[in-house]
């Protein structure tokens, strides 16, 4: 019994050390943690590029190998982030975790869920919500660009999701680069409301797709314009009321009047 108890204790200790090490890598601010987080971002961007190119390369012989390799990377990252979290249940309740689980399912079942594969690009939105990215950007004085970056990423995510949807349900009978570019052209022409006549979607479903794309797309463009031209604000939660956005030189919270101590990026 003592031997079994000792072995169980050692196993728990090993898991605790593993979780502590992963926590330092995923949430730490050391040079090693920064290199790890930068490498994770680069890998994520490569995965997103694979998702965008999927409609073009899915007929190639090596596609399934790439698909399952990406599935292994996504699964490893999700499992490691769970271990690094202090509250696994809370992490799994977050929308970004739901997105990652859904993406993993589409990768593990590329044939059964082929029609939902275009939603994998939501990984870009999930990446933009990564706290480690913005923490390092803030350390380098780029905090005012956070809201603008979010707006750009939201717009790009929407464009590629709609492009994937249009390609999957309207252009798939002619798979290849030309048809994917046609789907992208239709999406951008619709979102920007510049109009089109050479590429239109047939039937009621096509018209409804164009309507929804225009409504959401123009809203995202307005949001992007606001983020660029509106006076820059910083993210600094008020200790009293919790208001998170303030002018960079604010001394008092505009909601409750509490005295603020916003760090100066130049110091």
Image (tube, rainbow, N blue to C red):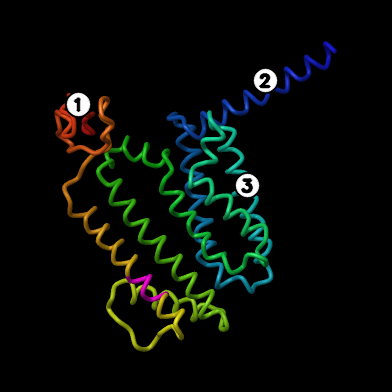
In the image, residue 12 lies at what x, y percent?
A: 69, 22
Look at mark 2 in the image and give the residue it sits on. Answer: 13
In the image, residue 161 lies at what x, y percent?
A: 46, 65
Look at mark 3 in the image and give the residue it sits on. Answer: 75
Q: Residues within 10 Å of mark 1 (few under 14, many from 20)?
A: some
Q: Quadrant of residue 2?
A: top right
In the image, residue 191 lies at what x, y percent?
A: 33, 71
In the image, residue 122 lies at what x, y percent?
A: 48, 57
Q: Please check the rendered image and state whether residue 180 is part of the magenta-colored stretch, yes or no.
A: no
**Which quadrant, please, contains the N terminus?**
top right
Q: Residue furthest front?
A: 204
Looking at the rendered structure, the secondary structure element under dot 2 is: helix
Q: Are marks 1 and 2 in contact (CB under 8 Å)?
A: no
- Above or below, comparing residue 100 to residue 66 in the picture: above
Q: Front-most of 49 and 101?
A: 101
In this rendering, position of residue 206 left or right of residue 61: left
Look at mark 1 in the image and give the residue it sits on. Answer: 260
Looking at the rendered structure, the secondary structure element under dot 3 is: helix
Mark 1 or 2 closer to N-term? 2
- For marks 1 and 3, give the one nearer the viewer: 1
Residue under the image location 59 percent in, 33 percent down: 83
Q: Are marks 2 and 3 in contact (CB under 8 Å)?
A: no
Mark 1 or 3 closer to N-term? 3
Residue under the image location 33 percent in, 57 percent down: 152
Extent of the magenta region? 209-214
Q: Residue furthest bottom?
A: 198
Q: Front-most of 41 and 1?
A: 1
In this rendering, position of residue 36 left or right of residue 108: left
Q: Residues within 10 Å of mark 3 (few under 14, many from 20)?
A: some
Gap in angstroms between the C-alphas marked 1 and 3: 42 Å
Q: Residue furthest top?
A: 2
Q: Please check the rendered image and state whether residue 211 is part of the magenta-colored stretch, yes or no.
A: yes
């Amino acid at each position: 019994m003592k031997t079994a108890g000792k072995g169980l204790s050692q196993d728990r200790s090993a898991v605790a050390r593993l979780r502590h090490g992963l926590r330092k890598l995923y949430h730490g601010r050391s040079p090693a943690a920064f290199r790890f987080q930068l490498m994770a971002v680069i890998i994520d961007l490569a995965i997103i590029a694979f998702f965008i190119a999927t409609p073009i390369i899915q007929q190639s012989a090596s596609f399934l190998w790439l698909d399952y390799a990406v599935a292994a990377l996504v699964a490893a990252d999700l499992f490691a982030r769970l271990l690094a979290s202090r509250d696994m249940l809370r992490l799994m309740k977050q929308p970004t975790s739901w997105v990652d689980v859904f993406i993993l399912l589409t990768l593990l079942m590329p044939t059964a869920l082929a029609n939902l594969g275009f939603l994998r690009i939501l990984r870009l939105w999930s990446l933009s919500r990564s706290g480690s990215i913005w923490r390092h950007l803030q350390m380098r004085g780029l905090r005012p660009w956070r809201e603008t970056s979010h707006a750009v990423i939201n717009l790009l995510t929407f464009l590629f999701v709609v492009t994937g949807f249009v390609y999957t349900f309207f252009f798939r009978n002619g798979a290849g680069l030309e048809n994917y570019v046609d789907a992208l052209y239709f999406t951008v022409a619709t979102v920007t409301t510049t109009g089109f006549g050479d590429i239109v979607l047939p039937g009621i479903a096509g018209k409804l797709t164009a309507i929804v794309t225009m409504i959401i797309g123009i809203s995202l463009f307005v949001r992007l314009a606001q983020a660029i031209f509106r006076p820059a604000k910083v993210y600094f939660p008020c200790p009293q009321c919790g208001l998170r956005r303030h002018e960079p030189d604010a001394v008092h919270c505009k909601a409750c009047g509490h005295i603020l101590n916003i760090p100066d990026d130049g110091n």
